[in-house]
Amino acid sequence: MIPAENVATPAALEGQPIERMMRDGVEYTILGTAHVSRASVQAVDALLETERFDAVAVELCPSRAHGIRDPEAFKQMDLFQVIRQGKAGMVAASLVLGSFQKRLAAQYGIEPGAEMKAAMDGADARGIPVWLVDREVGTTLKRAWRSVGFFQRFGLMAGMLGSVFEREDIAEEDIEKLKQSDLLESAFSEFAAGSAPLYRALIAERDEFMAAKLRENGAAMDASAPSRKVLVVIGAGHLKGMTAQLAEQHGDAGAIADELAVTPPAAKWPKLLAVGLVLAIFAAIGFAFYRNPSLGADALKNWILLTGGLSALGALLAGAHPLSIVAAFVAAPLKPFRPGIPSGAVSAMAEAWVRKPRVMDFERLRDDITHWTGWWKNRVARTLLNFFLVSIGTIAGEYIAGIHIIRSLF
């Protein structure tokens, strides 16, 4: 560690959490920031104005950095491709987090991540490189999702959906948490506190990843330069863990980062269970026809009405167009014949085709979703909502129909 007293301390840096250390010939000045604090923005500016750095590292991944630099980039989103490529869940999760940020900005008067933007803008103005050292947010969310069990996933989904209907004002204690922790950790704090795997995916793994990326980028710097100084701007919630990792981490930095950037494969048993359930239901329908054609016809009718009906109900609750509701009703009973294409995707694509999102829907998307009614008013948000509610309706219909059909045989 480099003693802090060896470095001049401007007034803007008084009381700010700063660590200074050397690793592999590179001097790192690590500033812990609060994502909703003007003081953190001022601290970033003060460090850049009073000290000379050869690079600036920020707690951002490329996609988040792009979003901060170009807030309007999401307007270029191809909704059809998002649904076809199975990314509707990730986009919806990002929008939910975005709505939380938007409400926070309106209430607290500063955009979360303003200190990261100040760091990048300051680096650009001085002609020094910006290092994006955080892991892709999509990878983090996928690793977090796949690290927990089946029932915890329902809790996470309920928490995300609950935030859509949350009141306009954000509780003061939640704002205080954001001053000391990470945005993702705060969003899932209730679950992360009681789940070691979830905490590791959201926080600890990212500490390791960021330390590895700093080492990797540091090793690529010109060793013959008179000095190699890097300003690192990270959330205060990562300061202790990332600094410890930077001091103690061993092994190939690139290999560590690559390993932590891999999305683990999805567990096979949920798909096998779903396939097994559908096969069992169709076997039961076949057996019902064998025993009595009338009984078989009733079983088939129940399958169509329950899966199609609950899927159509999901589309109806999402405020979908009548053609999208019909698409949901038709697609759900035929799910076994089109594996990998959820009923929600069929209905959502129909919705996007019938009610093509307008330019104003993309322009107003971030503002509309800050209030729960906006998810029904905005065509982009409503299409994503339609995807989820139809998918949930299909799953519920399959289980209810299966239980009803099997019970009818005994």
Image (cartoon, rainbow, N blue to C red):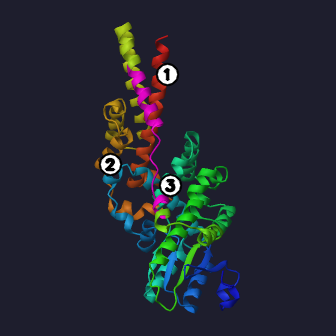
Give the left or right position of residue 408, taking residue 339 as reference: right
Residue at the front extreme? Answer: 251
Q: In which quarter of the image is the N terminus?
A: bottom right
Identify the residue at image location x=31%, y=35%: 338
The kind of secondary structure the magenta stretch mainly shows is helix
Would residue 131 appear left or right of 345 to someone viewing this image? right
Q: In which quarter of the image is residue 206?
A: bottom right
Q: Which residue is drawn at 40% across and 51% down?
A: 88
Location of mark 1 (residue)? 403
The answer, for residue 69, to whether it is visible in the render is yes
Viewer-proximal residue, 140 or 368?
Answer: 140
> Which numbered disc, 2 or 3, marks the residue that appears first in the sequence?
2
What residue is rendered at 47% in x and 58% in y?
259
Badge 2 or badge 1: first in the primary sequence: 2
Secondary structure, mark 2, is: helix
- Classify mark 3: helix, strand or loop: helix
What residue is shown with label 2? 84
Contact flag, marks 2 and 3 (Cβ < 8 Å): no
For label 3, the residue is 141
In the image, is residue 57 above or below residue 47? above
Is disc 3 surrounded by few (<14), some (14 to 19) or many (20+) residues within 10 Å?
A: some
Q: What crowding class fits label 2: few (fewer than 14 Cα within 10 Å), some (14-19), or many (20 or more)?
A: some
Question: Is residue 279 part of the magenta span, yes or no?
Answer: yes
Residue 172, how many percent across, how many down?
Answer: 68, 64
Magenta extent: 257-282
Q: Characterize the local packing of mark 1: few (<14), some (14-19) or many (20 or more) Cα atoms within 10 angstroms.
A: few
Instruction: Determine if the magenta segment contains residue 140.
Output: no
